[in-house]
Image (spheres, helix red, strand yellow):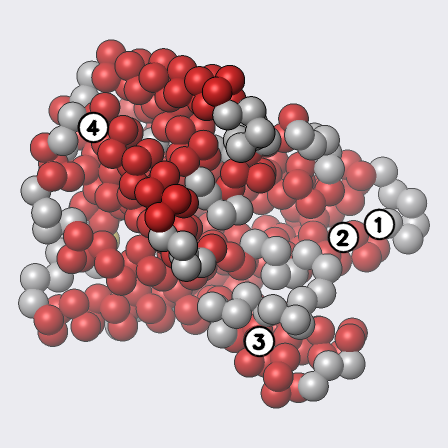
Amino acid sequence: METQPRQRAVKSGGAKRVVGLDVARGLLMAYVVTIIHGSFWLGIIPAPANSILLFEMPLIFIVSGAAFAHAPQPKTLRAYGFYLLSRGVRILAPYWAYTFVCALIVIYARGLPTLETLQAWLDPFRRAEGHAYMMMSWHLWFVTPFLVVTVLMPWLTRLPVWRMAPLWVWAASGTLIVLAVDTFWLRATELDRESVTYLLWALFGFGLGAGTARFATRDYGVVLVAALAAMAAALTLYPTHVTAVMQSNKFPPNAMFFLFSCAWVAAWLIAARMIDAKRIEALAEAAWVKPFIRSGYSIYLWQGLGYTIASLVGRPNHWNVFAIWALAIALTVVLGVIASPLERLRL
């Protein structure tokens, strides 16, 4: 997940693309589509054991923040406006294509009013509320905090702290900020809490991308041990107020989930130091990774329909859950790749 100085970088549309970031993004999207939603939507790994696997979202936002560090930064209001327009099109055009198709399916399947259903699906802040159908909207929550993070990054990354703060300060400060939001922001919505949490991870990713080599393995080790110790202390001292089931801590994300994420992120960043550039180059060329690198966002969106169709086909015919899972993955990848030109729109 960490950008290495020796990794190959290429220019793309004015931005310097780091192969390691592309590989990390592709692997994370593959992980979400196959393991995470196979576990939580189909139950291939039963709860609550599957909660230990929920490390993907902080890493996705770290990769996004690191990629932003390698892109041209908007320095004027005009450049910022163009940035918003460009990023907005690339995020929302694929989203609207997916949700429009889903809205038509729901109108037909549930007999709901056309205009109301279209409004509920096309508005990313409503997430198809009141007009959902099976698994088609379960994953769309991600788009709204991603939009918020995208809007705020150009302003917040100007602060020098992201390039200077010690790693333990990142972890401790982030935990206290999320805890403060939980405790004192009485009217905080789920979107507010998601945006604060994932913005912190995106800013950390920006700090990594802007100054890759400033943290040592021992820094990550300290954070890993401290996060695990803090989680153990919270579970021991406040057993009626906290839970080790991360699915409950993730929606909305709380301080326990942030500590859990700190431990996983530290572990993955330690592991990333052990992967050499040749292995990363090989992964970038692997046939099974390429679709997720090139079309990852579209594949992420269309998994809702892929899993729904597979369930509608397999469950009435009493298919084994792994057969349904395999069909869901295949449909998801095919639909995502077909729709993926929309995520490569350029203004």
Q: Position of residue 29 (x, y in %)?
A: 49, 43
Residue 189: percent from left, percent from top: 44, 58
Q: Quote the CA–CA distance across marks 3 and 2.
A: 24 Å
Q: Which residue is mark 2?
A: 310
Q: Nearer the viewer, mark 4 or mark 1?
A: 4
Q: Gap between marks 3 and 4, in whole Å?
A: 41 Å
In the rendered structure, the answer to whether residue 107 lies left or right of residue 83 reads right
Q: Earlier in the sequence, mark 3 or mark 2?
A: 3
* CB under 8 Å between discs 1 and 2: yes
Residue found at the very far right of the displayed protein: 317
Disc 2 crowd, CA 10 A, few/some/many (<14, 14-19, 20+): many
Residue in the image at 36% along x and 39% along y: 179
Query: In the structure shown, which secondary structural element does the residue marked by tag 1 occupy?
Result: helix
Q: CA distance from mark 4 to mark 2?
A: 46 Å
Mark 2, secondary structure of its residue: helix
Which three-letter amino acid code belongs to the residue tagged 4? Answer: Val
Name which of mark 4 and mark 2 comes first in the sequence: 4
Residue at point 17%, 52% (across, down): 156
For badge 1, the amino acid type reads Gly
Kindly identify which residue carries mark 4.
169
Q: Earlier in the sequence, mark 4 or mark 1?
A: 4
Between label 3 and label 1, give the one nearer the viewer.
Answer: 3
Instruction: Compare residues 231 and 75 and report the one nearer the observer.
Output: 231
The reply to whether callout 4 and callout 1 are in contact (CB within 8 Å) is no
Residue at numbered disc 3: 120
Location of mark 1 (residue): 314
Contact, mark 4 vs mark 2 (Cβ under 8 Å):
no
Q: Is residue 233 visible?
A: yes
